């Protein structure tokens, strides 16, 4: 197995002295599905931002797909994000006044895909998350759950090798949550590495590997051989 | 860089021009009002500057052109202040005596007859329209270099008849041209010509000019000139100016005023210039204030779009691509600005940011 994510002694201190991460060591291999759990404010989102190269560590080393993030130029970092990483934000971050289809198609905007092809694949991605009938809805005309699913579709439309999801089921009812998880599971089955932050214990329990975060540290890392993805609702 | 060995180099994909344009348009569509207002602000500021510069430089250029054309070597001689109650007058032969002075190239004269001119006999005598009937010497036009706009100038024959040549303003106010008749001192006079504008002798513009002989015969004019226009040899103006008082009125040189009309024009041009600088200053300040305002809006719009920038970076946009997006927005505007109204056709998003 090759490592997709390698974190060594990663710390993050925010201006104002908040120590969000205090020396995290973490390795995630290709094709893994990992659930990240922990109390609010424990540093889960901060850690996911490190993995997604959206933020740089104060100290320590972050290697994604074998690249040392500190050594990459802005250009190379952008290419890494555009071509290898799909990010689902806790707050969706959709463009208002833009249709769901175009929001999802924007996920491929910086990957060098032609517009027609972008929209075709965006349509497919929306179908996978169960929004085939909402293609032309603007993001401000959709419910929170629908928006979250659009955000998921945008993250997976480029079929990234690393999918990072910050509470993708937080706003969803059981049925829609299951659809979103099924989408992520399918990606994982196709070879993508998936990291999910969740507060839902059932979701966490169904994942083959669970990482517990507390006060900016990995406090537990359990792998249950038995729990396959099939057990995920 | 060891970690890159054996790995594909990471290169971001290029955005097509169409995509850049599309993203730019989308940014504008999201905030049409702001786009219209900032474009309007810039347009008004620039238009003001251009207008101020344009108007002032053209008016100044016109004054300078006039001066070049007419020369600055004209002096006028007029009766000046007098210490006794008697009104100062130039001697009847003032022009002839002035012509005798060395370096005086030409001298023409006019005399105020004290009569008024009317379009017809039914207009009340109080309504003179600010026009005067003046007796004129035949060489006046040559001195003033004023062309005849229509009709013709006086000759020895018409100078003794009931004929007038109108100054340009007089012709406009009377609405009369060559061939018409006007009413002077209870008689009909025939207009034989109309003059063009005379920038150095505005009193000619508002005059109805008749011959000295006719003024004597029909208007009871005493024959004393009220203004002598002289043309001095180039470069001798100051020198001659000192001699003209004596030449015009040897007995009472102190009752003679000599002036240089081009000085007034130059002064006016200078004042206009100063006024222009003032306007430019005010315009500049206005532009500056406008510019600061626009910069402020821009900063706010960037701040309020941090989230969008962050998202685009997460989707894999390079810093350069984000910059290009904003650049495209600012460039696309003028392209569509041909009809600002079109902006309102764009669907405004119902949500707010
Ligand atoms: N930009 C920032 N500036 C300063 N402090 C920050 C910033 N972002 C996060 N923090 C702090 O870092 C800590 C970890 O935040 P983080 O968002 O990672 O928590 P979390 O585990 O994702 O919580 P939640 O489950 O509520 O989303 C918090 O104490 C938070 O206040
Ligand atoms: Mg969080």
Image: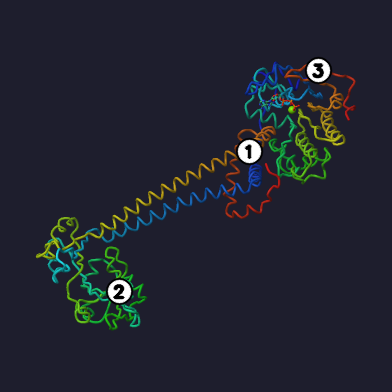
Labels 2, 1: front one: 1
Please report contact status of discs 2 and 1: CB closer than 8 Å, yes or no: no
Residue beneath label 2, please? B166
- What is the secondary structure assignment of the residue under circle 3? strand
Residue beneath label 3, please? A221
- What is the secondary structure assignment of the residue under circle 2? strand
Q: Residues within 10 Å of mark 1 (few under 14, many from 20)?
A: few
Quarter holding residue B102: bottom left
Pointer 2 and pointer 1 on the same chain: yes
Name the quadrant where ligand 2 sits. top right
Q: Is residue B265 left or right of residue A201?
A: left
Residue beneath label 1, please? B304
Camera-side residue: A69 or B337? Answer: B337
Chain at numbered mark 3:
A
Name the residue rendered at 30%, 63% in the picture: B199
Camera-side residue: B353 or B201? Answer: B353
Determine whether B22 is above or below B147 in the image: above
Quarter holding residue B235: bottom left
Mark 1 C-beta to ligand 1 under 8 Å: no
- What is the secondary structure assignment of the residue under circle 1? helix
Q: Position of residue A14 (x, y in %)?
A: 65, 23
Name the residue rendered at 44%, 54% in the picture: B51
């Amino acid at each position: 197995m090759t490592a997709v994510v390698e974190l060594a002694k990663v710390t993050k201190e925010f201006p104002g002295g908040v120590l969000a991460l205090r020396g995290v060591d973490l390795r995630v291999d290709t094709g893994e599905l990992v659930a990240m759990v922990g109390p609010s404010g424990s540093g889960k989102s901060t850690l996911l931002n490190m993995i997604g190269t959206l933020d740089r560590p104060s100290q320590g080393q972050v290697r994604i797909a074998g690249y040392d993030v500190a050594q990459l130029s802005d250009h190379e970092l952008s290419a890494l994000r555009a071509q290898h990483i799909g990010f689902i934000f806790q707050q969706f971050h959709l463009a208002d006044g833009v249709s769901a289809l175009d929001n999802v198609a924007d996920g491929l905007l910086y990957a060098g895909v032609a517009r027609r092809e972008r929209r075709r694949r965006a349509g497919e991605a929306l179908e996978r998350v169960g929004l085939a009938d909402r293609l032309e809805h603007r993001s401000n005309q959709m419910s929170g759950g629908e928006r979250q699913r659009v955000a998921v579709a945008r993250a997976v439309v480029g079929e990234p090798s690393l999918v990072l999801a910050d509470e993708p089921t937080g706003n969803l009812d059981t049925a829609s949550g299951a659809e979103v998880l099924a989408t992520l599971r399918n990606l994982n089955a196709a070879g993508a590495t998936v990291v999910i932050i969740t507060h839902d214990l059932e979701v966490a329990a169904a994942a083959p590997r669970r990482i517990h975060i507390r006060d900016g540290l990995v406090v537990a890392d359990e792998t249950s051989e038995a729990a396959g993805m099939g057990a995920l609702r | 860089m060891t970690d890159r060995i054996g790995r594909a180099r990471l290169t971001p994909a290029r955005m097509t021009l169409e995509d850049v344009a599309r993203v730019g348009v989308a940014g504008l569509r999201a905030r049409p009002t702001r786009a219209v207002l900032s474009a309007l602000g810039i347009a008004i500021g620039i238009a003001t500057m251009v207008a101020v510069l344009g108007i002032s430089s053209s008016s100044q250029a016109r004054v300078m052109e006039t001066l070049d054309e007419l020369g600055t070597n004209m002096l006028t001689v007029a009766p000046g202040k007098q210490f006794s109650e008697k009104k100062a007058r130039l001697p009847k032969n003032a022009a002839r005596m002035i012509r005798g002075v060395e370096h005086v190239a030409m001298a023409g004269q006019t005399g105020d007859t004290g009569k008024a001119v009317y379009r017809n006999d039914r207009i009340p005598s109080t309504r003179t329209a600010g026009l005067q009937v003046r007796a004129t010497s035949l060489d006046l036009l040559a001195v003033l270099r004023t062309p005849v706009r229509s009709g013709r100038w006086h000759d020895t024959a018409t100078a003794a008849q009931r004929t007038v040549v109108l100054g340009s303003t007089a012709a406009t106010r009377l609405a009369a041209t060559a061939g018409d008749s006007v009413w002077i001192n209870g008689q009909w006079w025939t207009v034989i010509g109309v003059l063009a504008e005379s920038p150095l002798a505005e009193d000619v513009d508002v005059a109805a000019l008749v011959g000295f002989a006719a003024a004597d015969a029909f208007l009871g004019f005493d024959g004393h000139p009220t203004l002598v226009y002289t043309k001095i040899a180039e470069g001798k103006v100051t020198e001659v100016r000192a001699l003209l008082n004596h030449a015009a009125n040897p007995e009472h040189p102190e009752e003679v005023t000599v002036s240089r009309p081009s000085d007034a024009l130059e002064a006016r041009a200078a004042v206009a210039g100063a006024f222009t600088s003032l306007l430019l200053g005010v315009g500049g300040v206005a532009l500056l204030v406008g510019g600061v305002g626009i910069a402020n809006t821009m900063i706010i719009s960037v701040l309020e779009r941090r989230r969008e920038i962050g998202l685009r970076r997460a989707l894999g946009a390079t810093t350069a691509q984000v910059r290009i997006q904003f650049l495209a927005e600012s460039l696309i505007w003028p392209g569509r600005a041909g009809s600002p109204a079109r902006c309102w056709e764009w669907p405004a998003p119902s949500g707010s940011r």
